Image (cartoon, grey):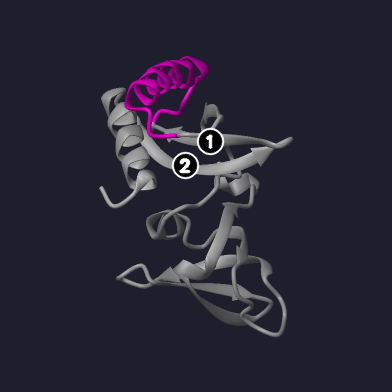
Amino acid sequence: MKNIDDKLHAITREVVDGCALELWGMEWTSDYGRRVLRVYIDSSTGVGLDSCVNVSKLLSARLDVEDIIQTAYSLEVSSPGLERPLFAPEHFRKYTGKKVRFKLARPLEGSRRNYTATVNDVSDNGLEVTFAFEGKVLVAKFEDISSASLVFEDENI
């Protein structure tokens, strides 16, 4: 493994796959000054509380044994929800034609970094995402999208 994040991702994927679920994504956040590892799991039939509790117990035990995280943290396992975060090019591809809220590391036009726009397309190699925004077409490099989430609309259900 290249680094701790790669190993953490591999361990998490192994645990989630072992539960016959999909690893939607994971992120480090801060909540009232404490580090939080958020793991999002999904399934074609949905994810209930029992699945989240089961993955949390199994993953917590595995991470304790592997001991790769050297600082204090809390583990949270949940469904990505209706306004799910988008972590990978295939997530954007899945929601082509839908509105997303996203933040860029570098502005596309002027000093603007925050957008709510419709996903038009994702390049075949996943390096660029094209959006419709206020009658214009915006093209963002995937690596420049620092965070993104689906915008809940009734037709998304």
Question: Main SS type for the magenta part?
Answer: helix
Examine the rendered structure and indicate whether residue 79 appears above or below residue 92: above
Which amino acid does the dot numbered 2 rest on?
Met
Examine the rendered structure and indicate whether residue 36 appears above or below residue 129: above
Please give the range of residues in magenta: 45-69
In front: 27, or 116? 27
Task: Give SS at disc 1.
Answer: strand
Task: Confirm or deny contact between disc 2 and disc 1 (CB under 8 A).
Answer: yes
Q: For mark 1, does the 10 Å Cα neighbourhood hold few (<14), some (14 to 19), or many (20 or more) residues?
A: some
Q: Residue at x 36, y 67 (%)?
A: 126
Mark 1 sits on what residue? 38
Q: Which callout, 2 or 1, points at the residue further toward the start of the chain?
A: 2
The quadrant in which residue 154 appears is top right
Task: Give SS at disc 2.
Answer: strand
Q: Residue at x 64, y 47 (%)?
A: 152
Which amino acid does the dot numbered 1 rest on?
Arg
Res. 25 mark: none
Q: Residue furthest bottom?
A: 110
In front: 134, or 21? 21
Mark 2 sits on what residue? 26
Q: Residue furthest front?
A: 70
Q: Position of residue 38 (x, y in %)?
A: 53, 36
Q: Position of residue 81 (x, y in %)?
A: 57, 36
Cα gap from disc 2 to disc 1, whole angstroms: 5 Å
Q: Residue at x 36, y 41 (%)?
A: 9
Is residue 53 one of those drawn in magenta?
Answer: yes
Q: Is residue 121 left or right of residue 126?
A: right
